[in-house]
Amino acid sequence: MDSKSFRDMQVQTRGEFGGLGIEVTQEDGVVKVVTPIDDTPASRAGILAADLIVAIDGESVQGMTLNQAVDKMRGAVNTDVTLTVLRGKEKKKLEVKLTRAVIQIKSVRSRREGDDIGYIRITQFNEQTYDGLKAAMQKFQQEMPGDKLKGYILDLRNNPGGLLDQSVAVSNAFLQRGEIVSTRGRNADETQRYNARPIDISKGKPVVVLINGGSASASEIVSGALQDHKRATLIGTRSFGKGSVQTIIPLGQNNGALRLTTARYYTPSGRSIQAKGIDPDIVVLQDVPDELKGKDDLKGEASLKGHLKNGDKNTEEHGSQAYVPPDPAKDKQLIAADELLRGIKTAQQLAQKAPEPKVEPKADDKKPDVKAPDAKAPEPEKKN
């Protein structure tokens, strides 16, 4: 990794950076605000969702990539930046001066499903993840005490992974004992095992984990551990299959770093995730809009050129569906999780008879522009 790639990776794993606090995407050559993040310079300055950022410090964003625009908005804490914004149908022009502050990447989002289920979405595994999960679970336990809380939905769909220690901590939030994951290098004496401590802050409540073709690496560690211990029911589609461990070796100031693959992940039962992924207990396919059909699948680790082989012959799998409807009312996987936790349907009733279609690799498949271990299709939003 060059020095910029290394810095970007450190920002993602730390989960904080100097910036403004807005999620943005690119639209018609300009930067569009998806949403301002609460209690940040952007929200305090009155930046609104759907605002169009056309210039940064007087420099037009036309011709910039989204990453270039984000880099210009990020910077040292307590420094100023001026955004030129167009607002509303009338495209009212505004000049907004903001002072950069420390922005935390919120990797955990939560809400109540009705008045009896706690829904927790983890978007990545950074240094903030376990603390965010613990806070969400404690809040649910206060709001829905005793038997009122039917259980938890842990949504790991399209989560590309991240830090190993955070995946172990998240798994331990639902486990009292036993192995969570092991990593095995090419030498037997390099094997490391990570075991649960008697924590289980979920207090034994039922758990459903949602996974799909975009769930990779740390997401697969959590899914595999809870599945092997029969602590959770997995619903969705087969995960990505990113089962290798990277060691980051810094190369000195401003020289970047080397990302070296050094081991494989194994679930508690000894399954290798690599190029195979985790199969859910209940396969539930989403209804994909016509305009997205054929584009809703990720090919998976096994389809990447030069990928690390599984080692177990004839077990590699080539991707699965990764589409998640933006409207929860149309999210068949989420609905199935609700019905299972509330006892409306059994696992047998939810299981689909039709097998999940395989995504066969093509001869000209190329490795997508992704960063291991966060191997997944990149999402359009950026935080800055």
Image (cartoon, grey):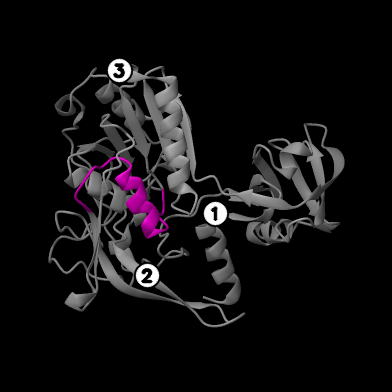
For the residues labelled 1 and 3, the Cα–Cα distance comes to 35 Å
Q: For mark 3, what is the residue?
A: 147
Which range of residues does the magenta coloring cover?
A: 159-179
Residue 23 found in image quarter: top right
Disc nearest the viewer among 2 and 3? 3
Left or right of residue 142: residue 355: left
Q: For mark 2, what is the residue?
A: 246
Q: Position of residue 131 (x, y in %)?
A: 46, 44
Q: Residue furthest front?
A: 198
Q: For mark 1, what is the residue?
A: 15
- Secondary structure at numbered mark 3: helix
Left or right of residue 18: residue 265: left
Q: Position of residue 282 (x, y in %)?
A: 21, 36
- Secondary structure at numbered mark 2: strand
Q: Residue at the spot x=42%, y=26% of the render?
A: 140
Q: Identity of the amino acid at label 2?
A: Gln
Residue 19 vs residue 332, the one in the foreground: 19
Q: Position of residue 127 (x, y in %)?
A: 48, 54
